Image (cartoon, helix red, strand yellow):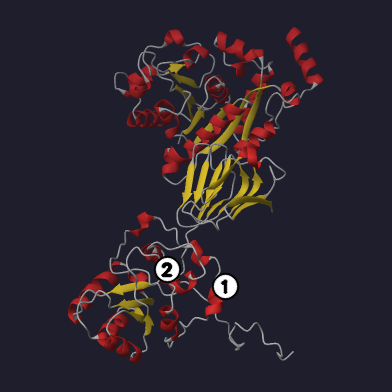
Amino acid sequence: MDSTQASAASVAPSSSFRLKGGLFPMTLLELKHFDAADFEADLQNKVSEAPAFFQQAPVVISAEQLQTESFDLDSCLSLCRQYGLIPVALRGGSESLQALARELNLAQMAESRQRGSRVATNSGGEEPSAMQQEPSALQQEPSALQQEPSAPTDEPPVPEQQQLLPLDESEASQLEVDAADREANECVDQSNDGVGSTAIETPPPAPMQSKIITTPVRSGQQVYAAGGDLIVMSSVSAGAEILADGNIHVYGALRGRALAGVRGDSKARIFCQSLEAELISIAGSFKLDEDLRGELWKKPAQASLSDEALNITGL
Amino acid sequence: MAKIIVVTSGKGGVGKTTTSAAISSGLALRGHKTAVIDFDIGLRNLDIVMDCERRVVYDFVNVINGEANLRQALIKDKRCENLYILPASQTRDKDALSQEGVERVLKELDEEGFEFIICDSPAGIEHGAFMALYFADMAIVVANPEVSSVRDSDRILGILQSKSRRAENGGQVEERLLLTRYNPARVAKGEMLGVEDVEEILATKLLGVIPESESVLKASNQGVPVIHDADSNAGQAYGDAVSRLLGEEVDHRFLSVEQKGLLQRLFRRSA
């Protein structure tokens, strides 16, 4: 029993816990300039707009936009805490500021890239080292990260309209996106703003927003689940169209058109209790009913994409 | 509160007006004070089917425009004590219906003590149909057992549950399916959709199945709603539908080919 054969060497030898990658939306507090009095006034203002959102909310302080070399990080942190925020990390800033951050037990976040650059392109060497410096639980075990489940890949297609942030200073941190994206080839086109804003609408653990429809989707109707899965508890009539950025589940007959992964998520799937669809599409690859009228016609089935080919299999 | 029931279908010629006439007469015959409104402005038919064409002086549009009051425009049915008809205008078009106007008329009818208000919708999904369904508490969706009619009914059900006042307020319009021109023999031969098929596609509670019958055409030409023809199976089927509308549990009839039923019918005819 005592492991002569060390368990798959990639995992840390410890058995009292498991290290896993996680992806959490976080608020980025981007400082433009720092003056304790101004900062407090602004902060108070913001917090009063959405008190629940700021309660115990982890924030990453960003000094990237800061003009000055250094600032009073200590008082910035205590003000944040005073208003219910929990500063967890510093992003950017000068050498001395970063040293100060380490002293103050703040994690160090990698600097953000050029706007519009793809996150995955930055999966180079400096990221992991930045992560490993962190004294806190933010440390990531690389191999575990590579097994990162589907969550991060589901995130990218965030509707653009959500990028209108109610709070301009806030922005999702790219905390773990970097590492996780090493595995996820699809890229996050500056989608982090969007992630942050979804978090603002529904506090912390709601990275994906599923849409649940309990009534039949009738001919001529169109239902779109932006940024998440679409679940229909009834049938989808011929002449109806259902779309989702994520997966589509139909707990009834699917007789209309179903388009999953409409923003390019090729891992999206379509599930239905009875396949009678006019059209099925995942990330742009589609099949028409004449191609679907096979063995699985009118049977429970799922559709998935592999190597650009749309596969229909039974459930 | 008066219960507002729209009789609608999307597709034309499936039996909306026949159904409106039959259901409203049926409700009135059971003692419920009922009004039936023709929303098919410009193509009015209800007054013909109910044989009150020559008694139309003022119409629905006159009431909406304030040119007549409701009592002047309502026509009392010849056969039923509790039934009143509000005819459509033949000279205007459907744009004459304003939402506020329709709402006001419905409110006045309610204040007059009507228990049921049946709105006979025009075909299509344009303004007139929209006005007819907007204030509905319940919808009787009339369909023939054929694919295009069922598809249009599906469409209208979608509109009911998204564009009606109830839907806008987060509620639901009660839906009932009425299958007309049903011919069990042709269903058995596979020439017509069966009740189960239609029910399954539309996922809507069945109010009734009206068998295809010569008596329906005869009734509408004579201006006597078919429900008064208690000998015809169509009249009986409408009677059953009215019972179900009033909450009674009644088994569906005339769904299958029954020699006995046919003989009975012939026997009754000759009698």
Tell me the chain of label 1. Answer: A
Pick the front one: B141 or B67? B141
Q: Is residue B30 left or right of residue A117?
A: right
Res B199 visible:
yes
Determine whether B41 is above or below A151 in the image: above
Pick the front one: A301 or B46? A301
Tell me the chain of label 2. Answer: A
Determine whether B152 is above or below A231 in the image: above
Image quadrant occupied by the N terminus of chain A: bottom right
Query: Whole-percent x and y of residue B19?
Result: 56, 22
Residue A121 is marked as: 2
Under mark 1, the amino acid is Gln
Determine whether A132 is above or below A242 in the image: below
Pick the front one: A34 or B127? A34
| Element at label 2 | helix
Residue at image position (45%, 40%) is B162
Q: Mark 1 and mark 2: span between their CA atoms?
A: 19 Å
Residue projecting furthest to the right:
B260
Residue at image position (27%, 84%) is A94
Query: Whole-percent x and y of residue B168?
Result: 41, 43
Q: Is residue A178 left or right of residue A240?
A: left
Under mark 2, the amino acid is Thr
- Pointer 1: residues within 10 angstroms few (<14), some, or many (20+)? few
Query: Whole-percent x and y of residue B125?
Result: 45, 29
Residue tagged 1: A147
| Element at label 1 | loop
